[in-house]
């Protein structure tokens, strides 16, 4: 999950609860324009405390999980392909 996903989640939950941007922003201590930028993927960073505050107001929380493995390199893909070819060879 990145900041764009967080912004989308905030927007979806805010709307589902019928909360206006201006009200959520005021309660969280940020400007409505900052909240709007976050919700629309135009804000590249926002402090963790502010994000935690927004989420808490909407009864959400931020959690962590193991990162997905890195994307394979060309060498990884070629090695995998060679192993598959080797398995297909008659014995």
Image (cartoon, rainbow, N blue to C red):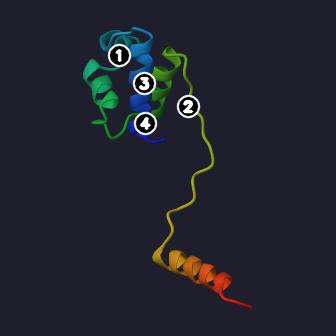
Considering depth in this image, is 55 or 70 the residue closer to the camera? Answer: 70
* Residue 79 occupies quadrant: bottom right
Q: Residues within 10 Å of mark 2 (few under 14, many from 20)?
A: few
Q: State the mark number for residue 78.
A: none
Q: Residue at x 57, y 26 (%)?
A: 61
Q: Residues within 10 Å of mark 1 (few under 14, many from 20)?
A: some
Disc 1 to disc 4: CB gap under 8 Å: no
Considering depth in this image, is 28 or 74 the residue closer to the camera? Answer: 74
- What residue would you read off at disc 3? 10
Q: Is residue 73 visible?
A: yes
Q: Earlier in the sequence, mark 2 or mark 4?
A: 4
Q: CA distance from mark 3 to mark 1?
A: 11 Å
Q: Residue at x 43, y 36 (%)?
A: 5
- What residue would you read off at disc 4? 5
Disc 3 to disc 2: CB gap under 8 Å: no
Rendered position, 26 above or below 6: above
- What residue would you read off at disc 2? 62
Q: Earlier in the sequence, mark 3 or mark 1?
A: 3
- What residue would you read off at disc 1? 25
Q: Residue at x 41, y 16 (%)?
A: 14
Q: CA distance from mark 3 to mark 4?
A: 9 Å
Q: Nearer the viewer, mark 2 or mark 4?
A: 4
Q: Is residue 28 visible?
A: no
């Amino acid at each position: 999950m990145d900041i764009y996903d967080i912004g989308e989640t905030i927007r979806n939950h805010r709307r589902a609860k019928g909360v206006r941007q201006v009200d959520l922003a005021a309660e969280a201590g940020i400007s409505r324009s900052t909240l709007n930028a976050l919700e629309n993927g135009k804000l590249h960073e926002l402090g963790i405390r502010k994000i935690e505050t927004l989420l808490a107001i909407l009864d959400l929380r931020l959690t962590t999980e193991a990162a997905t493995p890195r994307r394979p390199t060309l060498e990884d893909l070629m090695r995998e392909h060679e192993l598959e070819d080797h398995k297909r060879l008659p014995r």
